[in-house]
């Protein structure tokens, strides 16, 4: 079995496990809409970073850069970069 087929099999099993009877239906929709398209998905770490940056931007309205840096274990310049970037999808 090719690597792509193995990945598709793992995805199908995971969809069924997580979405029960809707898993196969979701999988069909994905294949119908995305079939033949090459996509790259972010890692879990990348998604976690997007969520963290979103929280930092929200919290920056009521907390200082120093507080945010301590809370999120980042230096003040990183906090300022995140707040100033304003890009919600920055990974």
Image (cartoon, rainbow, N blue to C red):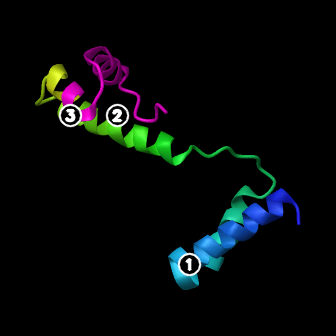
Range of magenta residues: 69-91
Report which quarter residue 16 is drawn in: bottom right
Give the number of the mark in front: 3 or 1. 3
- Pick the residue in front: 70 or 59: 70
Outermost residue toward the bottom in this view: 21
Callout 2 crowding tier (Cα within 10 Å): few <14, some 14–19, many ≥20: many
The mark that comes first in sequence, 3 or 2, is 2
C-alpha separation, residue under disc 3 versus residue under disc 2: 12 Å
The mark that comes first in sequence, 1 or 2, is 1
Q: What residue lies at 49% left-to-right and 33% top-to-bottom?
A: 91
Magenta stretch containing residue 78, yes or no?
yes
Q: Which mark is residue 71?
A: 3
Q: Secondary structure at mark 1?
A: helix
Above or below, comparing residue 86 to residue 23 in the picture: above
C-alpha separation, residue under disc 1 versus residue under disc 2: 30 Å
C-alpha separation, residue under disc 3 versus residue under disc 1: 35 Å
Report which quarter residue 81 is drawn in: top left
Confirm or deny contact between disc 3 and disc 2 (CB under 8 A): no
- Main secondary structure type of the part rendered in magenta: helix
Residue 46, percent across and down?
49, 40
> Would you name the residue on which mark 1 appears?
17
Q: Which mark is residue 53?
A: 2
Q: In the image, is 43 to the left or to the right of 88? A: right
Confirm or deny contact between disc 3 and disc 1 (CB under 8 A): no
Above or below, comparing residue 32 to residue 43 in the picture: below
Callout 1 crowding tier (Cα within 10 Å): few <14, some 14–19, many ≥20: few
Magenta stretch containing residue 86, yes or no?
yes
User: In this figure, what is the number of numbered marks?
Assistant: 3
Residue 56, percent across and down?
26, 33
């Amino acid at each position: 079995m090719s690597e792509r087929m193995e990945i598709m099999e793992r995805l199908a099993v995971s969809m069924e496990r997580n979405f029960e009877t809707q898993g196969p239906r979701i999988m069909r929709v994905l294949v119908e809409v995305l079939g033949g398209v090459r996509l790259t998905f972010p890692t879990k770490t990348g998604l976690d970073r997007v969520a963290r940056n979103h929280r930092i931007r929200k919290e920056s309205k009521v907390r200082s850069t120093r507080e945010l840096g301590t809370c999120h274990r980042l230096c003040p310049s990183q906090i300022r970069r995140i707040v100033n970037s304003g890009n919600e999808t920055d990974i």
